[in-house]
Image (cartoon, rainbow, N blue to C red):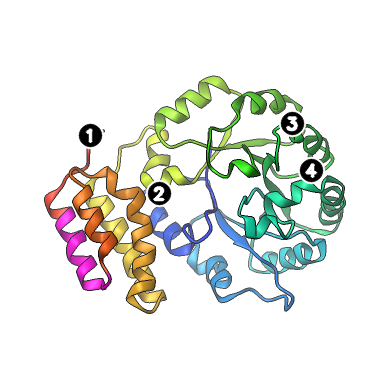
Amino acid sequence: MRLYLAPLEGITGWIFRSALYKCFGGFDKYFVPFIRPNQMGHFSAREKKDILPAHNEGMYTVPQILTNKPEDFIRTAAKLKEYGYEEINLNLGCPSKTVVTKGRGAGFLAYPDRLDAFLDEIFEKCDIRISIKTRLGMEEPEEFYDLMEIYNKYPMEELIIHPRVQKDFYKNTANLELFSEILPESRNPVCYNGDIFTPDDYERFVNLQPSVERIMTGRGVLADPALARRIRGGSAAGKEELRRFHELLYAGYCEEMSGDRTILYKMKELWTYLAPRFTNYKKYAKKIKKAEKCPVYEKVVEELFENEEISAS
């Protein structure tokens, strides 16, 4: 089984990916949260740091592009190839309203003719492998029948399917019934993405879909950084491993960001997922949420690691 780390905007940037790789490993591919091509044709400071080879050493890294303009995609793909990348990913899955209202991400799925023309041009003109991450459609899962006909026209590296529609966001459950029905129709290799939070989730999915050889997970890794290792039969994250993981993240954010508020915003986001892994975590999670200064935050986290253990649940 090939395991992929999903690109989560604002979360799985290079600092997170690097810490995850050094502490736990387990993934075959690490996807970079989307690049938005701009009118100037330049990468933003964040995007440049995310794709720098020095920040992705040892990892097979796949940058993701968010656009509905073929010329922007083609130009960005050429620049990424100059950085040494062999594969890029097109984002057709982001459900954010600010993205969708501009006809990008999952919003592009509402315009199948335009999407078809877009894909025709980029596959003709790009000299790099292209994968696609998609949802089932905007409103109804049945939209995917027509989308699959479009996808089957193009020789993509793989088709990553998150079986929800845009209006679902991340609510409800992934539509495994339609995924199962459409799977044999794909002429491209298929990767499944959605609701793999634990090794048990993985086992249940594999039992239902033994022919699928590629799985992407994102939110599950935030709660369990050792998820990929556990899926492969390895050990759960130990407390000292989690401490090291936290230290690498925190040090990275302190070095890259300015101001306690900005740094703590990133760390508080992490702890909303990670805190339940510890015994008696609620009182510490509350203090972390209230912390406004880094020294206060550091003291609370130190107390958590000193006083509590990894929960058995």
**292 relative position to 49: left or right:** left
Amino acid type assigned to the residue bearing label 2 in the image:
Leu
Of labels 1 and 4, the one closer to you: 1
Q: Residues within 10 Å of mark 4 (few under 14, many from 20)?
A: some
Of labels 3 and 1, the one closer to you: 3
What segment is highlighted magenta in the picture? 292-304
SS type, badge 3: loop
Whether 213 is drawn above or below 244: the answer is: above
Q: Residue at x 85, y 47 (%)?
A: 116
**269 relative position to 59: left or right:** left
Alpha-carbon distance for marks 2 and 4?
32 Å
Mark 1 or mark 4, earlier in chain: 4
Mark 4 or mark 3, earlier in chain: 3
Residue 26 seen in the current view: no
Mark 3 or mark 1, earlier in chain: 3
Q: Residues within 10 Å of mark 3 (few under 14, many from 20)?
A: few
SS type, badge 1: loop
Q: Residues within 10 Å of mark 2 (few under 14, many from 20)?
A: many
Circle 1 residue = 312
Q: Chief secondary structure of the magenta span?
A: helix
Q: 290 or 148, which is in the foreground? A: 290
Circle 3 residue = 142
Residue 18 lies in the magenta-colored region: no
Circle 4 residue = 155
Amino acid type assigned to the residue bearing label 4 in the image:
Pro
Amino acid type assigned to the residue bearing label 3 in the image:
Glu
Quadrant including the C terminus = top left
Circle 2 residue = 222
**133 relative position to 207: left or right:** right
SS type, badge 2: helix
